[in-house]
Amino acid sequence: MTSIRLPRLFRDVERPSLSRQMMRVGAAIAIVFIAIALLAPLFQSIGWLQNPTEFLDNPPHQAPSLAHWFGTSSLGYDVFSRTLFGTQAALQVVILATTLSLIIGVPLGMVSGYLGGRLDRVLIFFMDTIYTLPGLLLSVTLAFVVGRGVLNAAIALSIAYVPQYFRVVRNQTISVKTELFIEAAQAMGASTWRVLSRYLFLNVIQSVPVLFTLNAADAVLTLGGLGFLGLGLPDDVPEWGRDLNQALDGLSTGGIWWTAVFPGLAMTLLVVGLSLFGEGLNELTERKTR
């Protein structure tokens, strides 16, 4: 019996590549967390979730039950409610931080790579100096300076990611600016701004979405570290890192595991989802480029 060979298009649909599988799994996890962040206030308003900042009515260190699905903390906070609202705080800070670093790093990389000269050397020196510093240490130092808050935490996180966007975009700009269509635009009298915005921009940002996703995953962990050290968000904002810090006493004394497991699991799942999506997108982008 002869075997029937399917067209290539149908074979690709039947057996998706590993990069596409990773993207789908990562996108599904990220969408779930985004939905939680958007729907958590609605669930609280209709009585399905407790107020994450109220604790006087709850018994402390109560194990997971029907009344409190994830148990309660040492102060009586509902861990389930704080874990869901922690998603909202994490996504706000992470999206704002990575967007700020993108807005700063991409234009600087394009200008540096296109103009070159002394400006390029100064920017490279400045960015390399920032890049050599550990990201968490730099964020902790900046958090001391700017203080606590959503915007302040985003600023503290974004500075560490600016050099990454700068280096990627600068290298792409240097390779693209020698193409014939750039030289033709320059010969026709196009201004520097027109060349950068119309001809270079779309040709040098192919790797930016991948970098944006991977930086978002790293920013979740860094924000958790700041919260664990007490340098992240204010006390009245539910945040996973701060909840992990408060769970230490229960783990060491009474074996109260739920106050640390659920916030830590939420942080881990979000990081895994963003990392899978970024790695899958990276492989897919490299394959298309080749």
Image (spheres, rainbow, N blue to C red):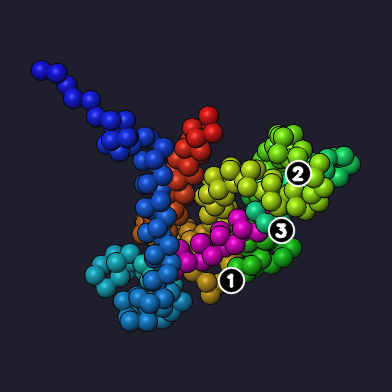
| Residue 9, image x, y percentages | 32, 35
- Using the image as rendered, state which of residue 273 and residue 241 is in the foreground: 273
Q: Quadrant of residue 36?
A: bottom left
- For badge 2, the amino acid type reads Ala
**Residue neighbourhood size for the residue with mark 3, other residues' Cα within 10 Å, grouped as few (<14), some (14–19), many (≥20):** some
Q: Quadrant of residue 39?
A: bottom left
C-alpha distance separating marks 2 and 1? 51 Å
Which of disc 3 and disc 1 is earlier in sequence? 3
| Residue 67, image x, y percentages | 27, 73
| Residue 52, image x, y percentages | 43, 74
**Residue neighbourhood size for the residue with mark 1, other residues' Cα within 10 Å, grouped as few (<14), some (14–19), many (≥20):** some
Residue drawn at x 29%, y 66% is: 69
Q: Main secondary structure of the magenta part?
A: helix
Q: Residue furthest top?
A: 1
- For badge 3, the amino acid type reads Leu
Q: Is residue 102 above or below residue 187?
A: below
Q: Quadrant of residue 85?
A: bottom left
Q: Are marks 1 and 3 in contact (CB under 8 Å)?
A: no
Span highlighted in magenta in the image: 85-101
| Residue 120, image x, y percentages | 83, 42
Q: Is residue 44 above or below residue 166?
A: below
Residue 190 seen in render? yes
Residue drawn at x 71%, y 58% is: 142
Q: Which mark is residue 185?
A: 2
Residue named by callout 3: 142
Quadrant of the image for the N terminus? Answer: top left
Mark 2 residue element: helix
Q: Which mark is residue 234?
A: 1
**Residue neighbourhood size for the residue with mark 2, other residues' Cα within 10 Å, grouped as few (<14), some (14–19), many (≥20):** some
- For badge 1, the amino acid type reads Pro
